[in-house]
Amino acid sequence: QSALTQPASVSGSPGQSITISCTGTSSDVGVYNYVSWFQQHPGKAPKVLISDVTQRPSGISNRFSGSKSGNTASLTISGLQAEDEADYYCNSYTTSGTWVFGGGTKVTVL
Amino acid sequence: EVQLVESGGGLVQPGGSLRLSCAASGLRFEGYWMHWVRQSPGKGLVWVSRIKTDGSATYYADSVKGRFTISRDNAKNTLYLQMNSLRAEDTAVYYCARDRPTWDWGQGTLVTVS
């Protein structure tokens, strides 16, 4: 049950696009389309941004989009805004019937 | 509106036990798998356990297997996590969450093992 691999930090200027990667294995990300992305501001509970690789829940800005290729999923934030500064986590279902999270990525808006 | 409210956290000595609860409202509780996820101070999210709609299937992270037990009472719309043989590394905020695709979360309850 090793954590999915995410970059520790990503930064960008307002208006730019950034992409956060989430690398797993053929036992999790690579085999199921059950990858989700979460945003967490300090002291707050996580909030889902993307479910099932590409699905954006109602109320989530279309500036957030998800994709997957092989064992790596990605979250793209376009038109970066100051309020996007937060921690971001991916998770995936696994062949063991468990779930696993990524280590998290801190996004900084320059 | 879906609400998940955790309770039962607190300070416990190593080797002790604690039972967390998660009261659900605004959803058909019995229709969803439910999860526990924890976050140690300053660290990332870690999946802990999940339970099937009727409680007939449960799964655990290796780090808690044999020590923690997840359960639910659909009549009371409540999820539980019984934590035994607690260790310092179990110190964390514990969140309950509704399964994909909605992934609703509670606000968490802090467990301190010291």
Image: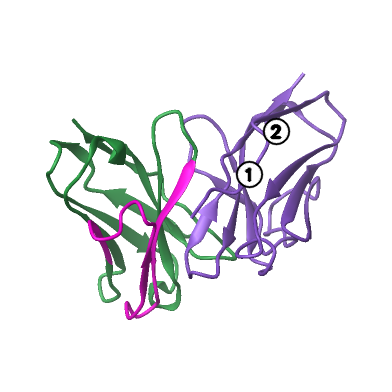
Residue highlighted by disc 1: A5
Magenta stretch encompasses residue B52: yes
Query: Please, is residue A67 above or below residue A13 in the view?
Result: below
A61 or A74, which lies in front? A74
For residue A26, what is the image quadrant?
bottom right
Q: Position of residue A78 (x, y in %)?
A: 84, 40
Image mark 2: chain: A
Q: Of the two numbered discs 2 and 1 on the same chain, state the one appearing first in sequence.
A: 1
Rendered residue at 26%/76% (across/down):
B75
B38 or A5, which lies in front? A5
Q: Position of residue A23 (x, y in %)?
A: 68, 50
Residue highlighted by disc 2: A84
Magenta region: which residues? B45-70
| Mark 1 crowdedness (10 Å alpha carbons): few <14, some 14-19, many ≥20 | some
For residue B64, what is the image quadrant?
bottom left
Q: Are marks 2 and 1 on the same chain?
A: yes
Q: Determine the residue located farthest toward the top in the rendered image.
A: A110
Rendered residue at 39%/36% (across/down):
B40
A87 or A44, which lies in front? A87
Magenta stretch encompasses residue B89: no
Say which element carries label 1: loop
Say which element carries label 2: helix
Image mark 1: chain: A
The chain assigned the colour green in the figure is: B
Query: Please, is residue A102 above or below residue B43 in the view?
Result: below
Residue type at numbered disc 1: Thr
In the picture provided, is A93 more to the left or to the right than B5?
A: right
Q: Position of residue B50 (x, y in %)?
A: 40, 65
Colour in which chain A is drawn? purple
